[in-house]
Amino acid sequence: MNKIETLKKTFSYNGCNYSLALWVTAWDYLCLGYKDVTDLTYKLVSVVIEPDTNNIIEPVRENGFIGQTNTLDDACEMLKKYIDTLNIEDEE
């Protein structure tokens, strides 16, 4: 199983519904995060994947909930860690 498959695909938080998304940034990097399903320009949290960077950044409030790392697997781990802090209940 790939790490991306272990992430929540969709969830509700603070009255908004979010879904997992993968997109290309304006600087031609991949970015993995959660977008509001009714306003795709709004992102709850995202992690930019820059293969050659040495600057690893966790997605926290101080940087607009935008992280940065080297690999897709590391981005998945960062998102999972962040989403776990939200204490989202699994829907039945």
Image (spheres, grey):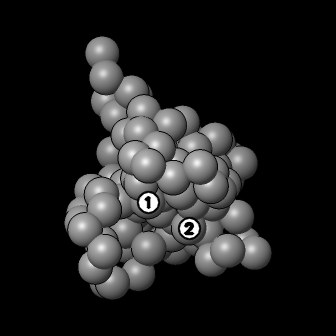
Residue at the limit of the structure toward the top, as seen here = 1
| Amino acid type, residue under disc 1 in the picture | Val
Q: Distance between the Cα atoms at labels 1 and 2?
A: 7 Å
Give the side of residue 5 with respect to residue 16, left or right: left
* Residue in the foreground of this view, choosing between 58 and 4: 58
Q: Vertical placement of 36 versus 7: above or below?
A: below
Which quadrant would the N terminus be assigned to in this image? top left
Query: Label for residue 66?
Result: 2
Counting residues from the N terminus, which is met first, the one under dot 1 or under dot 2? 1
The quadrant in which residue 59 appears is: bottom right
Q: Position of residue 58 (x, y in %)?
A: 66, 54
Label 1–label 2 contact, CB within 8 A: yes
Q: Position of residue 30 (x, y in %)?
A: 30, 57
Mark 1 lies on residue: 48
Residue at the limit of the structure toward the right, as seen here = 62
Residue shown at the point (28%, 79%) measured from the top left:
26
Which quadrant would the C terminus be assigned to in this image? top left
Query: Label for residue 77?
Result: none
Q: Position of residue 88 (x, y in %)?
A: 60, 48
Tag 1: Cα neighbours inside 10 Å, few (<14), some, or many (≥20)? many
Residue shown at the point (48%, 57%) measured from the top left:
47
Give the side of residue 56 with respect to residue 15, left or right: right
**Can the viewer see residue 37?**
no
| Amino acid type, residue under disc 2 in the picture | Ile
